[in-house]
Image (cartoon, rainbow, N blue to C red):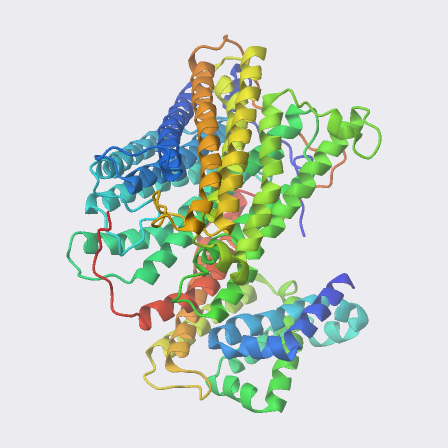
């Protein structure tokens, strides 16, 4: 296999790139990323407030006013955090990464970025308006046969179109860079970016098909809908989205953290293999969200256990690489003994502390995910608060805290400011409050879920049933956790905008770790994206054709719409 | 040698009666999972076999063409509905499946691929695209049950699965033709 590395091919940096390197961040590119990050954290604050309202209501401590519906709040919370926050932050982060590592965004790509933002804003306006009006309390999963206002789904179309524009922009920029750097490997962070945008683009095919199927039904042009089909199409995207955030978080673990702690990238080839595996094996994982769905036979569910578990491999590889990086760096700094390297890690630096907590949380979060992938284990917890606890641990800690960790160096870098020791200290406090809040909230959610408390329901004692009353202490802890989280949420909102507009002016480097000296050359097959994409499509086909054909040809009578709120 | 050991483990796993009957219980898994995995077993055996019998491969498959023709014949044979049926009903044919796919399809494909020129590689891709496409259309449109062991719906599912596989090959071909690699590599 031919291997070409930076060492074997002379760099062909353009004049523009050299200028870019000297002047630091490109202001126009930075503006786009900063606007996206601002939107992300406004959504984060609003979603957080809705989360608190919901948590207090669920614990029986707060009664919602008559004009506000629990499911409306739940929908707003999910849409703002799961769809808006995560997507806008991910795109803003990777566009900044492309700008930095590829020598700036192309003017047309920047324009596409603004156009994509415009489309996403239009989408969010449609979606938010219908939720506020009480016409779309269908939660972020918008499962039929619950039916929202048709304009809710039209808004989702705009959101997807915006995402596609960003994906095309990314591909154009990467192709341009590769033309000017023939034979070279794409910088690792940009490589992660390609993986993320491939997943965003191809992963959204399923949900696009679903929304285009729902719209005629929502407008009343068709009377009934195939519920199983829509759920399956949704999760082909839903699960992919989860892993898109995860891949974004992991990119900072591989690329930025080693630099911040004074270490090197553990192994460039391994990192790229993690990206390839995460892309190729991802979409098929969607089925484990449907293990309890009755319309899929056991054979298919059994097959999908393996497909879902396969995504555990790149996660394990990442865990190994990360801890190897920490140990190597610690030992280089003179650490002795089996675990002496733990002590020399920069625990007081929020740029390390936050992602480190995110990584540690992924150990129980990933283990929970593996448990839930198994049919029998999932049967016990699937429709309970356990699942809510699980995704608050994965998304709420592993991803969100990683994103917060990125903020501490990315925002000052983009806004040409610096992270002061005072703000670092506040960041550490924010991280600890958030972590404590999540331990209380996600922890009690897991326990109360095992005790049988259902998810997606507002507060009820089921006529003072003894079992239901037994959940109350845990729900109380859930409310305490929620309260701590809103404090963390407000602090983070303040930190982001302080770093953007108020922090002292100065230069903050974009931390990109280098490879170890004498590292093995990365094989060039890692750059063959055509092969990986086709392989991904083939695996998606293997996973989805059998159940989809069954759902379409053996479909029960379709369902008319329901408005349950 | 390492690859051969992995191949042997996969081979034994696929032969295990519960695994084989589970894979054969669904028509699409039978053709699109079990059979390709048997080809992969052959892939993994190839370096070991080439090391053990170097003269055989030089003598019989110097430029890769005989090997790829053998691969095509075996592939087409296992796409026939009757072959699938017989593999389920007749033990000898089942045995032939477990021998032919690794050794007459997987091994020759891997051995031939590096020896073939661009033309033969393109022919192989076009051949796979067309056969999967045609078999897909056949299985989708045929109004009668082609295999005694599988229901009509399974047949249609296999048809769609084959068609999607053909589309994947087609997408790869189009991308390979339209993207000028010399501009990037």
Side of A485 relative to A230 (left or right) = right
Query: Taking A512 as reference, is B157 above or below it?
Result: below
- Residue A312, percent from left and from top: 60, 51
Side of A58 relative to B72 (left or right) = left
Query: Taking A107 as reference, is B3 above or below it?
Result: below
- Residue A179, percent from left and from top: 51, 38
State the residue at coordinates (47%, 16%): A499
Give whichever of B54, B5 is nearer the camera: B5
Q: How many marks?
A: 0
Give whichever of A154, A488 is nearer the camera: A488
Say if residue A273 shows up in the picture.
no
State the residue at coordinates (53%, 82%): B77
Say if residue A350 shows up in the picture.
yes
- Residue A549, percent from left and from top: 37, 69
Q: Quadrant of residue A133?
A: top left
State the residue at coordinates (54%, 70%): B33
Q: Residue furthest top?
A: A504
Side of A180 relative to A91 (left or right) = right
- Residue A80, percent from left and from top: 35, 35
Q: Residue furthest right?
A: A337
Query: Taking A391 as reference, is A132 above or below it?
Result: above
Give whichever of B66, A415 is nearer the camera: A415
């Amino acid at each position: 296999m031919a291997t070409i590395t930076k060492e074997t091919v002379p760099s062909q940096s353009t004049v523009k790139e050299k200028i870019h390197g000297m002047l630091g961040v490109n202001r126009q590119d930075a503006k786009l990323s900063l606007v996206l990050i601002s939107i992300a954290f406004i959504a984060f604050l609003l979603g957080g407030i809705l989360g608190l309202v919901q948590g207090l209501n669920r614990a029986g401590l707060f009664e919602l006013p008559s004009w506000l519906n629990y499911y409306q709040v739940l929908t707003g919370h999910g849409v703002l955090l799961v769809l808006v926050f995560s997507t806008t932050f991910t795109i803003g982060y990777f566009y900044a990464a492309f700008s930095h590592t590829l020598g700036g965004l192309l003017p047309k790509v920047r324009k596409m970025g603004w156009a994509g933002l415009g489309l996403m804003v239009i989408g969010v306006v449609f979606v938010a308006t219908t939720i506020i009006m009480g016409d779309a309390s269908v939660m972020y999963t918008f499962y039929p046969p619950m039916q929202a206002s048709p304009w809710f789904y039209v808004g989702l179309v705009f959101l997807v179109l915006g995402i596609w524009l960003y994906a095309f922009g990314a591909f154009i920029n990467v192709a341009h860079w590769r033309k000017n750097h023939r034979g070279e490997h794409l910088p690792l962070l940009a490589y992660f970016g390609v993986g993320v945008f491939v997943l965003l683009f191809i992963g959204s095919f399923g949900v696009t098909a679903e929304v285009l199927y729902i719209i005629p039904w929502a407008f009343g042009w068709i009377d009934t809908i195939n519920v199983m089909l829509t759920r399956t199409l949704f999760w082909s995207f839903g699960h992919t989205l989860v892993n898109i955030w995860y891949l974004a978080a992991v990119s900072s673990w591989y690329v930025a953290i080693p630099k911040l702690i004074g270490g090197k990238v553990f192994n460039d080839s391994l990192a790229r293999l993690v990206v390839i595996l995460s892309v190729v094996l991802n979409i098929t994982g969607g089925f484990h969200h449907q293990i309890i769905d009755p319309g899929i036979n056991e054979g298919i569910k059994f097959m999908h256990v393996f497909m879902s578990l396969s995504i555990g491999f790149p996660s394990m590889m990442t865990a190994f690489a990360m801890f190897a990086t920490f140990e190597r760096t610690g030992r280089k700094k003179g650490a002795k003994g089996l675990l002496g390297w733990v002590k020399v890690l920069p625990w007081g630096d929020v740029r390390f502390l936050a992602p480190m907590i995110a990584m540690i949380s992924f150990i129980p979060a990933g283990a929970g995910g593996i448990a839930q992938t198994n049919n029998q284990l999932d049967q016990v917890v699937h429709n309970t608060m356990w699942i809510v606890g699980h995704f608050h641990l994965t998304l709420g800690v592993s991803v969100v805290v990683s994103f917060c960790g990125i903020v501490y160096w990315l925002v000052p870098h983009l806004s040409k400011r610096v992270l002061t020791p005072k703000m670092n200290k506040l960041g550490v406090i924010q991280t600890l409050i958030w972590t404590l809040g999540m331990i209380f909230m996600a922890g009690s959610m897991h326990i109360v879920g095992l005790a049988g408390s259902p998810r997606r329901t507002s507060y009820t004692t089921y006529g003072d049933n003894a079992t239901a009353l037994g959940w109350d202490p845990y729900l109380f802890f859930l409310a305490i956790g929620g309260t701590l989280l809103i404090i963390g949420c407000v602090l983070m909102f303040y930190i982001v905008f302080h770093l953007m507009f108020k922090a002292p002016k100065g230069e903050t480097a974009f931390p990109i770790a280098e490879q170890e000296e004498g590292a093995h050359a990365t094989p060039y097959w890692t750059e063959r994206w055509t092969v990986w994409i086709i392989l991904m499509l083939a695996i998606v086909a293997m996973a989805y054709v059998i159940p989809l054909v069954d759902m379409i040809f053996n479909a029960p009578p379709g369902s008319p719409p329901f408005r349950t709120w | 040698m390492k690859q051969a050991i992995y191949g042997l483990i996969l081979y034994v796993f696929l032969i295990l009666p519960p695994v084989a009957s589970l894979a054969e219980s669904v028509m699409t898994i039978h053709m699109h999972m079990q059979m390709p995995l048997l080809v992969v077993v052959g892939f993994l055996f190839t370096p070991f076999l080439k090391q053990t019998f170097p003269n055989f491969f030089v003598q019989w498959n110097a430029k890769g063409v005989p090997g790829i023709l053998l691969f095509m014949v075996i592939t087409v044979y296992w796409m026939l509905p009757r072959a699938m049926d017989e593999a389920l009903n007749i033990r000898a044919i089942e045995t032939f499946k477990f021998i032919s796919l690794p050794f007459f399809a997987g091994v020759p494909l891997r051995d031939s691929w590096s020896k073939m020129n661009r033309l033969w590689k393109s022919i192989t891709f076009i051949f796979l695209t067309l056969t999967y496409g045609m078999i897909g259309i056949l299985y989708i449109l045929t109004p009668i049950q082609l295999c005694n062991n599988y229901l009509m719906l399974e047949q249609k599912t296999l048809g769609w699965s084959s068609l999607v596989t053909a589309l994947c090959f087609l997408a790869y071909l189009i991308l390979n033709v339209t993207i000028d690699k010399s501009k990037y590599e």
